[in-house]
Amino acid sequence: MSVNITIRDAVKKYGSNTIITDLSLDIKEGEFFTLLGPSGCGKTTLLRMIAGFNSIEGGDFYFNDVRINDMDPVKRNIGMVFQNYAIFPNLTVEKNVAFGLKNRKLSKDVIVEKTDKFLKLMKIEEYRDRMPERLSGGQQQRVALARALAITPDVLLMDEPLSNLDAKLRVEMRTVIKEIQNTVGITTVYVTHDQEEAMAVSDRIAVMNLGDIQQIGTPKALYQRPANLFVATFIGRTNIIKSTLHAEGQKTFITLPGNHRIELSTIMADQRKDQEVILSIRPEELYLKPEGEDGVKAIIDDAVFLGLNTHYFVHFESGEKAEIIQESQIDSILEKGSVISLGVKTQKINVFDKDGKRNLVMGVHNDLVGGAR
């Protein structure tokens, strides 16, 4: 049975150092929920508080209506997958998967049935008699995941499970993890610092920094309408440009490099006033205009061909730099030093106040709860 996870006003301290202050969070039953952020932001600390491996200095943690703050980790019925696999080197694949089932003193028939089920589900049945030393990293992580799921936990917790794998295996395993989670429908809390990984597997993501949640939302919502400058720069690639917002009656304009003014209809009504702002423009939202057509003048510094797309690195007359992603053309790639004219998809621009703490554009969605910050 999966559960809802509710956290209210969580506090975590190490001595006089407060790591997490007044954090609240709701995770839905059966949801794949990811804690994403840089090293030291508190994401693994929060995961370990849910697991019962870290003490809780304040607040309340619930699985459904059951408060778990003082509950022994063994009684929380969680499955845990670590970045270093943590499978037993002296046991075969089959015995690793069956380990938790034997500890629960289930009948031999049930142990065999569940072990076989998850060996097949994780596609490691053919390795059942192998020792871990004879497995690849990806195969070992499949064993760890099978062992965690075999005990039918209420919650699956995963702490940077793919960080020790090479790039190709990481992509393969994140697909496996998402498919398995969809199949078993278990509430999953996943910790990673890799934003692409988070975007690929998550139903919703909480972006964390310095012990605080900056924004909670779907991958699409976080990418298209980040709540602040930190989220904009942490999720995906973006160009950051200092600008000014200028209101003329009911119309609002921003200034791009080269004093190129464009109208924006997406600014919130209460922010349509003259002010300094910071623009976030994704590389794919800048596009090349036909030769001779008015736009933002830029000079190409470099071009990187990556198959489907070509990445151009440019600078403006003001000296500011930017990246543009364009669909690769069959005939040519623009040469270094070429002068180009750029347009921008105005509906996709994000505009932040001068401190970068607030997005001034309509449509920003944030699932922050109660005291979460």
Image: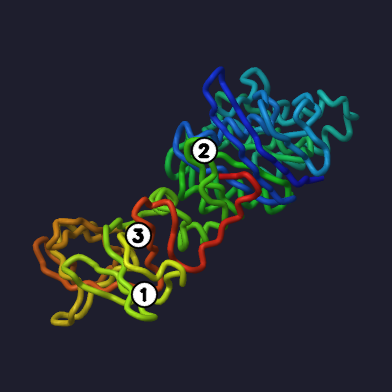
Rendered view: 332 above or below 134: below
Rendered view: 26 above or below 296: above
x, y percent for residue 175: 56, 50
SS at circle 2: loop
Residue at which label 3 appears: 280
x, y percent for residue 281: 34, 62
Q: Residue sitting at 16 percent across and 66 percent down?
A: 298
Q: Amino acid at mark 3?
A: Ser
Q: Nearer the viewer, residue 312 or 207?
A: 207
Q: CA distance from mark 2 to mark 3?
A: 30 Å
First in sequence, mark 2 or 3: give its number.
Answer: 2
Q: Residue sitting at 20 percent across and 65 percent down?
A: 257
Assess disc 1: are there few (<14), some (14-19) or many (≥20) residues with their C-alpha within 10 Å of its C-alpha.
some
Q: Nearer the viewer, residue 54 or 169?
A: 54
SS at circle 1: loop
> Can residue 197 be seen in this snapshot?
yes
Q: Amino acid at mark 1?
A: Leu
In this rendering, position of residue 302 left or right of residue 160: left
Q: Amino acid at mark 2?
A: Leu
Q: CA distance from mark 1 to mark 3?
A: 14 Å
Assess disc 2: are there few (<14), some (14-19) or many (≥20) residues with their C-alpha within 10 Å of its C-alpha.
many
Residue at which label 1 appears: 264
In this rendering, position of residue 185 left or right of residue 16: right
x, y percent for residue 137: 52, 33
Residue at which label 2 appears: 162
SS at circle 3: strand
